[in-house]
Image (cartoon, helix red, strand yellow):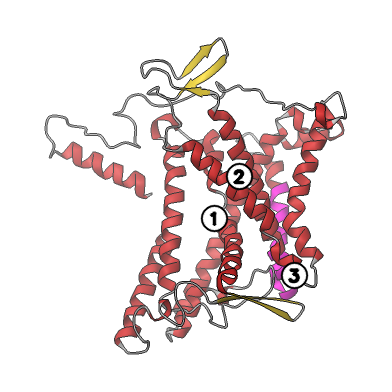
Amino acid sequence: MVFICGAILFNVIINARNANDEQSNGRFEYYRSPYGFFSQNTTTTKDNEAYVFTGDTGRLVGMWSAMNTIFFSLQGFFTVAVTAAENKDLDRDEGIKLATRKISLRVILMYTLFVFTVGLNVPYDDSNLRDYSVNSIRRGQYSAIIIACVRSRITGWPHFVNAFFIFSAFSAGVNALYISSRLLHALANIQNVWPLWANFIKSRLEKTTSKGVPAATVFVSWLFGLLAFLAVQPLPTKILGRMAINSTASMLIVYAAVCVSFLYFKTRTLNGAPDENVVITTPEGVFLNRNARDYPYKSHLQWLRAAYALCGCILLLLFNGWRSFLRPFSAPDFIASYISLFIFVLFVVAYHIKDEREWNPLHWTRRVTLDISNPMVTREKDLRRRKGRLHRANRRSFFSRANGVRFLEYIWVWLK
């Protein structure tokens, strides 16, 4: 976050310097004609044949292509919740609740400001930004902030930015290793996930060290890090790009499944009295009281936002591989874009074949537990102990040392 804030200020400063030194035609040169906020066309190349899309079609396919990159960069907001099992004082500190809110707000706001400010110094048709290949991930010298430094004749800073890219990639790898190992360990503890012939693998993966670290799942997850060496040569970078598209498609399936699950979860809630318990038992079953003071999932327009996200994920999933259909047809790009969807359907079918008594799909039923009381709802009811809400320590005097300390603690909770 500190680096992104610094990069935003850096782009604003060099833009103001270039405008004062008359090195540019104004502070918003690249947001005016002939550039503008939207590109005039979108160009993609397949087998040395260029396809140029102009007008509204060009803007649509350009935005659609950018959405794949954006989703790949921004996926993983939910991974904060994976740390809940190892979170100290979960109900009092409200770490998961605050983190899930802050990470999305910070990333979306900071990235939007960064894209806007770097666009002040780099035009969208810069030759170093162009990448006509269908799917690829290129090296750091093609980064927009480094190009901004080069265009402004600034030396030294590109090396610092490249060093931070290495640090950022390392920290992202560590985070991915933690998340993947914990998810694999959680799957190892679910008996229905594993067939009988894989019980030996399951028993190995569910073991932990004396400190509670799942060493086996950490090692298995670490092996996938060797795929990073694909970025060493130019040709494998396309393979790495296809893997990124495949990862984006897989996460879109996960997000769509989460939206469907949440929409069904909403059917297990009702509007009860505020003084009633959050868990209510009725003749129709167990429900959650949305109006209860302890109801922990309160927000506005939940159903509408889930339905909107579901439609968006389905559309992006179905059309994310549109460039593979350009002549000549690219089978590798088609497979990278849509194989996750076929694997998901295959898993669903295999799961039903394993547990259903009949092979006829028309007689298959959804296997859901409807156990909304597990895990138990936990929320600190003492407002004086909760860190996610600002409250005065000294009710008698507004301007007091205790209230000042409490305010600084509140600001620190939201900043850290």
Find the distance from the CA under tag 1 to the CA under tag 2: 12 Å
Neighbour tally class for label 2: few under 14, some 14-19, many 20 plus, Cα within 10 Å: many
Q: Is residue 260 above or below residue 223?
A: above
The residue singled out by tag 1 in the image is 74
Specify which label sits upstream in the sequence, 1 or 2. Answer: 1
Residue 208 visible to the viewer: no
Q: Nearer the viewer, mark 1 or mark 3?
A: 3
- The residue carrying pointer 1 sits among few (fewer than 14), some (14 to 19) or many (20 or more) residues within 10 Å by Cα, namely few
The residue range painted magenta reads 220-241
The residue sitting at the front extreme is: 56
Closest to the observer, 361 or 409: 361
Residue 326 circle label: 3
Q: Earlier in the sequence, mark 2 or mark 3?
A: 2
Residue type at mark 2 is Tyr
Indicate the position of residue 220 as horizontal and vertical percent values. 73, 47
Question: Alpha-carbon distance for marks 1 and 3?
Answer: 27 Å
Q: Is residue 194 left or right of residue 245?
A: right
Comparing marks 1 and 2, which lies closer to the viewer? 2
Inspect the image, locate mark 1, and give the three-letter code of the amino acid beneath it.
Leu
Element type where label 2 sits in the image:
helix
How many C-alpha atoms fall within 10 Å of the one at disc 3: few (<14), some, or many (≥20)? some
The residue furthest top is 283
Pick the front one: 359 or 250: 359
In this view of the protein, can residue 387 be seen by the observer? yes
- Tell me the quarter of the picture where residue 293 sits: top left
Overall secondary structure of the magenta stretch?
helix
Q: Considering depth in this image, is 134 or 93 the residue closer to the camera?
A: 134
Q: Amino acid at mark 3?
A: Leu
> Which residue is tagged 2?
255
Front one among 163 and 272: 272
State which tag comes first along the sequence, 1 or 3. 1
